[in-house]
Image: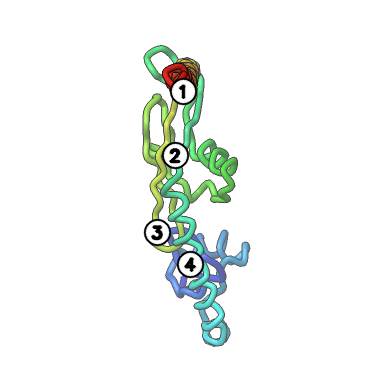
Amino acid sequence: MKIILNQDVVHLGEEGDVVEVKDGYARNYLLPTKTAVIYNKANAALFASRAAAIEKRKAEKRAASASLKERLDDVSLTIVVPAGESGKLFGSVTSQMVQNELQKLGFEIEKKKIEVATHAIKMTGTYTVVVHLYENDLSHIKLVVMSEAEKLAADRAKAEAEAKAAAEKKAAEEAAAEAAAQSEEAPAEEAEAATEENN
Protein backbone atom coordinates (compact mmCIF):
# COMPACT_ATOMS: atom_id res chain seq x y z
CA MET A 1 0.00 0.00 0.00
CA LYS A 2 1.31 3.45 -0.91
CA ILE A 3 1.12 6.00 1.93
CA ILE A 4 2.35 9.47 2.87
CA LEU A 5 3.94 9.81 6.32
CA ASN A 6 2.48 12.43 8.68
CA GLN A 7 5.50 12.21 10.99
CA ASP A 8 8.94 10.62 11.14
CA VAL A 9 8.87 6.83 11.53
CA VAL A 10 12.10 5.04 12.47
CA HIS A 11 13.42 2.74 9.71
CA LEU A 12 10.62 3.86 7.37
CA GLY A 13 10.95 7.54 6.50
CA GLU A 14 10.36 11.17 7.41
CA GLU A 15 7.34 13.42 7.43
CA GLY A 16 6.08 13.96 3.88
CA ASP A 17 7.80 10.89 2.40
CA VAL A 18 5.79 8.65 0.08
CA VAL A 19 6.54 5.01 0.96
CA GLU A 20 5.26 1.57 0.08
CA VAL A 21 4.36 -0.65 3.07
CA LYS A 22 2.51 -3.89 3.63
CA ASP A 23 -1.26 -3.50 3.77
CA GLY A 24 -1.56 -4.87 7.31
CA TYR A 25 1.10 -2.50 8.71
CA ALA A 26 -0.71 0.46 7.15
CA ARG A 27 -4.26 -0.58 8.13
CA ASN A 28 -3.45 -1.82 11.64
CA TYR A 29 -0.86 0.70 12.81
CA LEU A 30 0.06 3.64 10.59
CA LEU A 31 -3.42 4.79 9.55
CA PRO A 32 -5.22 4.33 12.94
CA THR A 33 -2.46 6.19 14.81
CA LYS A 34 -2.58 8.98 12.19
CA THR A 35 1.11 8.44 11.53
CA ALA A 36 0.34 8.25 7.80
CA VAL A 37 -2.41 8.87 5.26
CA ILE A 38 -3.28 6.93 2.13
CA TYR A 39 -1.56 8.19 -1.00
CA ASN A 40 -4.02 9.81 -3.39
CA LYS A 41 -4.13 13.00 -5.46
CA ALA A 42 -5.83 15.05 -2.73
CA ASN A 43 -3.37 14.02 -0.01
CA ALA A 44 -0.40 14.44 -2.37
CA ALA A 45 -1.58 18.00 -3.18
CA LEU A 46 -2.02 18.75 0.53
CA PHE A 47 1.54 17.63 1.34
CA ALA A 48 2.89 19.52 -1.70
CA SER A 49 1.37 22.73 -0.29
CA ARG A 50 3.00 22.02 3.09
CA ALA A 51 6.42 21.15 1.57
CA ALA A 52 8.11 24.41 2.63
CA ALA A 53 7.01 24.06 6.25
CA ILE A 54 8.08 20.40 6.30
CA GLU A 55 11.53 21.30 4.91
CA LYS A 56 11.90 24.05 7.54
CA ARG A 57 11.12 21.54 10.32
CA LYS A 58 13.62 19.08 8.81
CA ALA A 59 16.33 21.77 8.81
CA GLU A 60 15.58 22.56 12.48
CA LYS A 61 15.74 18.85 13.33
CA ARG A 62 19.10 18.53 11.54
CA ALA A 63 20.54 21.49 13.47
CA ALA A 64 19.25 20.14 16.79
CA SER A 65 20.62 16.70 15.95
CA ALA A 66 24.09 18.10 15.19
CA SER A 67 24.11 20.02 18.47
CA LEU A 68 22.94 16.98 20.43
CA LYS A 69 25.56 14.78 18.72
CA GLU A 70 28.38 17.12 19.83
CA ARG A 71 27.17 17.02 23.43
CA LEU A 72 26.52 13.26 23.47
CA ASP A 73 29.91 12.31 22.01
CA ASP A 74 31.58 13.72 25.15
CA VAL A 75 29.36 11.72 27.52
CA SER A 76 30.66 8.75 29.48
CA LEU A 77 28.13 6.80 31.55
CA THR A 78 28.84 4.57 34.54
CA ILE A 79 26.21 2.10 35.67
CA VAL A 80 26.70 0.17 38.92
CA VAL A 81 24.86 -3.13 39.16
CA PRO A 82 25.09 -6.22 41.37
CA ALA A 83 27.44 -8.85 39.91
CA GLY A 84 29.24 -12.04 40.85
CA GLU A 85 33.00 -12.32 41.40
CA SER A 86 33.54 -13.39 37.78
CA GLY A 87 31.93 -10.14 36.55
CA LYS A 88 28.67 -11.73 35.41
CA LEU A 89 25.74 -9.45 36.21
CA PHE A 90 22.70 -10.48 38.23
CA GLY A 91 20.34 -9.30 35.49
CA SER A 92 21.46 -7.13 32.57
CA VAL A 93 21.97 -3.55 31.43
CA THR A 94 19.32 -2.56 28.89
CA SER A 95 18.55 0.48 26.77
CA GLN A 96 16.01 1.55 29.43
CA MET A 97 18.80 1.80 32.04
CA VAL A 98 20.96 3.79 29.61
CA GLN A 99 18.01 6.11 28.91
CA ASN A 100 17.53 6.67 32.66
CA GLU A 101 21.23 7.55 33.10
CA LEU A 102 21.06 9.97 30.16
CA GLN A 103 17.94 11.58 31.67
CA LYS A 104 19.88 12.22 34.89
CA LEU A 105 22.38 14.17 32.76
CA GLY A 106 19.58 16.16 31.10
CA PHE A 107 19.28 14.32 27.76
CA GLU A 108 15.77 13.42 26.61
CA ILE A 109 16.20 10.51 24.20
CA GLU A 110 13.63 7.88 23.29
CA LYS A 111 14.44 4.33 24.35
CA LYS A 112 13.95 2.99 20.83
CA LYS A 113 16.75 5.26 19.58
CA ILE A 114 19.30 3.74 21.98
CA GLU A 115 21.08 0.66 20.68
CA VAL A 116 22.83 -1.48 23.29
CA ALA A 117 25.21 -4.13 21.97
CA THR A 118 23.50 -7.55 21.84
CA HIS A 119 20.31 -5.83 23.20
CA ALA A 120 21.41 -6.44 26.82
CA ILE A 121 24.79 -6.34 28.56
CA LYS A 122 25.41 -9.24 30.93
CA MET A 123 29.06 -8.72 31.99
CA THR A 124 31.01 -5.89 33.65
CA GLY A 125 33.31 -3.90 31.40
CA THR A 126 33.42 -1.01 28.97
CA TYR A 127 31.00 -0.87 26.06
CA THR A 128 29.94 1.50 23.30
CA VAL A 129 26.27 2.42 23.06
CA VAL A 130 24.93 3.84 19.79
CA VAL A 131 22.28 6.56 19.87
CA HIS A 132 20.38 7.09 16.61
CA LEU A 133 19.72 10.77 16.08
CA TYR A 134 18.01 12.47 13.12
CA GLU A 135 18.47 10.88 9.69
CA ASN A 136 21.82 9.03 9.60
CA ASP A 137 23.44 10.84 12.54
CA LEU A 138 24.80 8.47 15.16
CA SER A 139 26.39 9.22 18.50
CA HIS A 140 28.65 6.75 20.28
CA ILE A 141 28.57 6.87 24.09
CA LYS A 142 31.10 5.17 26.33
CA LEU A 143 29.35 2.97 28.88
CA VAL A 144 31.20 1.54 31.88
CA VAL A 145 29.37 -1.27 33.66
CA MET A 146 30.75 -1.82 37.17
CA SER A 147 29.85 -4.26 39.90
CA GLU A 148 29.07 -2.85 43.33
CA ALA A 149 32.34 -4.37 44.68
CA GLU A 150 34.37 -2.63 41.93
CA LYS A 151 32.63 0.66 42.72
CA LEU A 152 33.50 0.35 46.42
CA ALA A 153 37.13 -0.43 45.57
CA ALA A 154 37.29 2.52 43.14
CA ASP A 155 35.75 4.88 45.74
CA ARG A 156 38.22 3.65 48.37
CA ALA A 157 41.18 4.16 46.01
CA LYS A 158 39.92 7.63 45.09
CA ALA A 159 39.54 8.59 48.77
CA GLU A 160 43.08 7.33 49.51
CA ALA A 161 44.48 9.29 46.54
CA GLU A 162 42.69 12.46 47.69
CA ALA A 163 43.99 12.00 51.25
CA LYS A 164 47.54 11.47 49.95
CA ALA A 165 47.28 14.56 47.70
CA ALA A 166 45.98 16.63 50.65
CA ALA A 167 48.86 15.41 52.85
CA GLU A 168 51.43 16.26 50.15
CA LYS A 169 49.88 19.71 49.69
CA LYS A 170 49.96 20.34 53.43
CA ALA A 171 53.61 19.23 53.63
CA ALA A 172 54.50 21.50 50.70
CA GLU A 173 52.73 24.45 52.36
CA GLU A 174 54.58 23.80 55.66
CA ALA A 175 57.91 23.58 53.83
CA ALA A 176 57.18 26.85 52.01
CA ALA A 177 56.20 28.56 55.27
CA GLU A 178 59.40 27.29 56.97
CA ALA A 179 61.52 28.48 54.03
CA ALA A 180 59.83 31.90 54.18
CA ALA A 181 60.47 32.12 57.93
CA GLN A 182 64.15 31.25 57.46
CA SER A 183 64.55 33.82 54.68
CA GLU A 184 63.05 36.49 56.97
CA GLU A 185 65.42 35.52 59.83
CA ALA A 186 68.56 35.71 57.64
CA PRO A 187 68.27 39.46 56.75
CA ALA A 188 67.46 40.27 60.39
CA GLU A 189 70.65 38.44 61.56
CA GLU A 190 72.72 40.21 58.88
CA ALA A 191 71.33 43.55 59.99
CA GLU A 192 72.22 42.79 63.65
CA ALA A 193 75.74 41.74 62.64
CA ALA A 194 76.18 44.93 60.61
CA THR A 195 75.07 47.16 63.54
CA GLU A 196 77.49 45.36 65.89
CA GLU A 197 80.40 45.93 63.48
CA ASN A 198 79.55 49.60 63.19
CA ASN A 199 79.56 50.01 67.02
* Horizontal side, residue 116 vs residue 31: left or right: left
Residue with the mark numbered 4? 63
The image position of residue 1, as x and y in percent, is 46, 70
What residue is rendered at 56% in x and 87% in y? 49
Q: Secondary structure at mark 2?
A: strand
What residue is rendered at 47% in x and 21% in y? 195
- Find the distance from the CA under tag 1 to the CA under tag 3: 75 Å
Label located before the other in sequence (1 or 3)? 3
Q: Amino acid at mark 1?
A: Ala
Q: Residues within 10 Å of mark 3 (few under 14, many from 20)?
A: few
Q: Amino acid at mark 4?
A: Ala
- Find the distance from the CA under tag 3 to the CA under tag 2: 19 Å
Can residue 187 be seen from the camera position used here? yes
Label located before the other in sequence (3 or 2)? 2
Mark number, residue 76: 2
Label located before the other in sequence (4 or 1)? 4
- Find the distance from the CA under tag 4 to the CA under tag 1: 72 Å
Reply above or below: 21 against 173: below
Mark number, residue 137: 3
Q: Which one is nearer the viewer's eye here, 187 or 114?
A: 187
